[in-house]
Image (tube, rainbow, N blue to C red):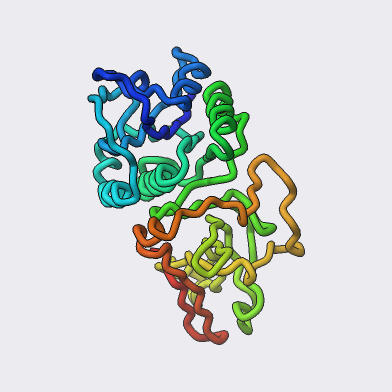
Amino acid sequence: MARPLILMPCSGTKLDHPAPALDFYQGVMWQSLRANADPNRMPHIVVLSALYGFVEGSAVIEPYDRKLTEARARELYCDLDQFVKGVPWPKDATRILIAGGGHYRHMMRAMVGALIHNGKLARHLQISEVSGGIGTQRSQLGQFARDPSSLPSPYAGYHQNGTPCLREAWGLRVGDRVRTTGRYVGKAGPKFARIEELFVGPGGPTVSVEFEDDRPPLANGKQRPAQAYRAAWIGVENLERAGCVQSAVAESEHYLDPDEIWQPNPGLRQMTGGGDAPLDLLMEEEGESESLAPRS
């Protein structure tokens, strides 16, 4: 059985001599982790150090004193590729906990996004994040260390700039079959697709979809060659579930109100280049060529 992955922040309280990261940091979050995790089935731990960046829990840390400022976060963000290659990430991990806030949380989200993009982690994950005051965060960390499935996992992944991808929101969920509505319905009718991602883009609630190839066979009966681009980003208001009227998502362990999604501060937004570029679906008149804007 694959071990879960916990991304831990470093702490101000440390040992005064070199030690493995699991023992080196003495902050309250680390105390909660060690008190609740089974030493014989310890989750895979990766720590975000303000000095060293992302390091494995077993790595020996030399004493240091440095804070993760916004400027330092920008520097580390530029080195994500180095950490993708240099850290032994558990490729089989499907349950992940992000146990940091502020700059740490944004960096951890971006790190997971980079790992997914580079094939170091699965595309669709079950991700939890700590929230609330420090007491609540300690409790959530301890709960996850004892039983990862006990915490809600509203996130399925992140984009490389840290944008969260939700498992379900706005009456839709990953895997749903949907159809286009409004201005995206051509003379031939709506286009059908499967939802791959749900996220808050620059233009608001956005869905990444994979469109079905509904073109008829060629005159000789053979199937048409696969189209180069069948994926696009489209606004939620232009989609509805196929075969039913769109309705509110039922409360479940995976649901998260999109309005409550944590967002990085403006400075860190600039660090990522302003977020994902909005993409749209371009539809032509029936009988003419059609173009799907590919995702970057």
* Residue displayed at 63% across by 59% down: 177
Left of 139 or right of it: where is 21?
left
Residue 151, position as x, y percentages in the image: 61, 33
Q: Nearer the viewer, residue 39 or 122?
A: 39
In the image, residue 227 sits, relative to residue 88, either above or below, namely below
* Residue displayed at 47% across by 82% down: 289
User: Is residue 145 something that shows in the picture?
Assistant: yes
Q: Nearer the viewer, residue 132 or 99?
A: 132
Residue 120, position as x, y percentages in the image: 36, 41
Residue 256, position as x, y percentages in the image: 63, 48
In the image, residue 236 sits, relative to residue 120, either above or below, namely below
Q: Quadrant of the C terminus?
A: bottom left
Number of labels in the image equals 0
Q: What is the residue that sits farthest to the top in this orientation?
A: 40
Q: Nearer the viewer, residue 52 or 93?
A: 52
* Residue displayed at 37% across by 21% down: 22
In the image, residue 238 sits, relative to residue 90, either above or below, namely below
In the image, residue 62 sits, relative to residue 111, either above or below, namely above
Residue 34, position as x, y percentages in the image: 46, 18
* Residue displayed at 44% across by 19% down: 42
User: Is residue 80 something that shows in the picture?
Assistant: no
Residue 178, located in which quarter of the rendered image? bottom right
Residue 63, located in which quarter of the rendered image? top left
